[in-house]
Amino acid sequence: MKDAEIYLFGSLSNVRKGNRDDPIRYALGAPMPLNQFLECLEIASDKVQLAMVNYRAVFLDYVIHPGDRIALFPKEYAIFSDWKNFRT
């Protein structure tokens, strides 16, 4: 089973230690909603401005799967504030 890869940007990258440029690899045993996964990472969902899974903007209730690429952008990335209408 492939690990999920999580890329954290801006202030969200403060939750990890070591090289912040490398993705976090997470052995996701089964599909789960992204907002539940954020709890596993100890990231408050209200801190996330934009979530992308496999290069597509998604809502936080989107179900992620093993092998997905997840990118999380914080509130300070204001350029993404108008992306809400483009999420799947």
Image (cartoon, rainbow, N blue to C red):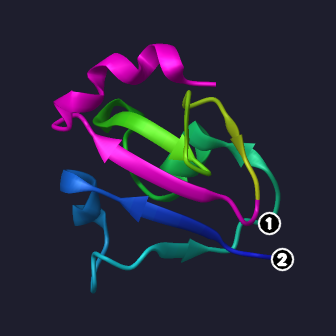
Secondary structure found at label 2 = loop
Q: Quadrant of the N terminus?
A: bottom right
Disc 2 to disc 1: CB gap under 8 Å: yes
Q: Is residue 27 magenta?
A: no
Residue at 45% in and 53% down: 71
**Nearest to the observer: residue 19 or residue 14:** 19
- Where, by quadrant of the figure, is residue 20 drawn? bottom left
Residues packed near mark 1 inside 10 Å, few (<14), some (14 to 19) or many (20 plus):
few
Image height of 35 relative to 40, above or below: above
Secondary structure found at label 1 = loop
Residue that badge 2 annotates: 1
Would residue 75 appear left or right of 26 to someone viewing this image? left
Residues packed near mark 2 inside 10 Å, few (<14), some (14 to 19) or many (20 plus):
few
Which amino acid does the dot numbered 1 rest on?
Answer: Gly
Image coordinates for residue 42, horizontal then vertical, percent: 41, 54
Please tell me the numbered disc located at residue 29: 1
- Where, by quadrant of the figure, is residue 66 drawn? bottom right
Image height of 7 relative to 16, above or below: above
Residue at 23% in and 34% down: 75
Which amino acid does the dot numbered 2 rest on?
Answer: Met
Range of magenta residues: 66-88
Q: Residue furthest top?
A: 85
Q: Quadrant of the C terminus?
A: top right
